[in-house]
Image: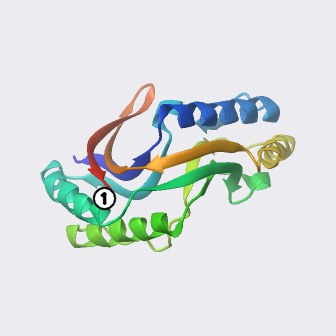
Amino acid sequence: MGVRCFVAIELPGDARQRLAALMDALREESGIPKGIKWVAPSNLHLTLKFLGSTEESALPAITHALTQAVSAHHGFTFALRGAGAFPSPMRAKVIWAGVDAPETLALMAADVDSTMEPLGFERDARPLRAHITLGRVKDRLTGPEAVRLGKAIEAHAAYDAGTIAVEAVSLIRSDLQPSGHVYTCIQRSYLS
């Protein structure tokens, strides 16, 4: 049994608080008491690469490769702006906060992806669609519930949760506990 892990940009506490306020507003405005699994504010992050179940013996090679990929990039900022959903607000399966980022983010994500390939991790088939997952629709919503949720999401399409300075990328371990996922940073790799 391996360690379930992913590569991500961790968010500072103030950004997580602003996104928690957005989740509260969406929850209240949609009026859906259950059926949506909201992400705990402490777990909010921007995923760059999901690695899945990984042997602990592979972690040193992964952290070394991650450091090499990330250190080739300079620090940058991105804005947390807007709410949306995949595949669409009226048919939401994943509710997200938007990320307005420079091309640097996509280039760094591509470098992380290609650096992990020789270690046995398949390259992502699609380019990064940067977003912060806020919640997942777990139960089938009724027609009126789906409309209310879609309207709540659309009402926050211009939500501004501030700007994030990116100085590091983290390898994060995910452990499923009865209370939900617990994320632990294995290592931070710093940008130049």
What residue is disc 1 on?
192
Pick whichever, 160 or 179, lies toward us.
Answer: 160
**Along the horizontal axis of the image, is 70 left or right of 33?**
left
Q: Is residue 67 visible?
A: yes
Q: Amino acid at mark 1?
A: Ser
On the image, the x and y values in percent for residue 80 come to: 61, 48
**Along the horizontal axis of the image, is 39 left or right of 57?**
right
The part of the image, by quadrant, that contains residue 14 is top right
Q: Is residue 149 above or below residue 32?
A: below
Pick whichever, 135 or 8, lies toward us.
Answer: 8
Q: Residue at x 18, y 52 (%)?
A: 59
Dot 1 falls on a residue whose secondary structure is loop
Pick whichever, 151 or 130, lies toward us.
Answer: 130
Q: Residue at x 40, y 51 (%)?
A: 8
Q: Is residue 166 above or below residue 186?
A: below
On the image, the x and y values in percent for residue 20 come to: 61, 32
Q: Residue at x 79, y 42 (%)?
A: 149
Q: Is residue 40 visible?
A: no
Q: Residues within 10 Å of mark 1 (few under 14, many from 20)?
A: few
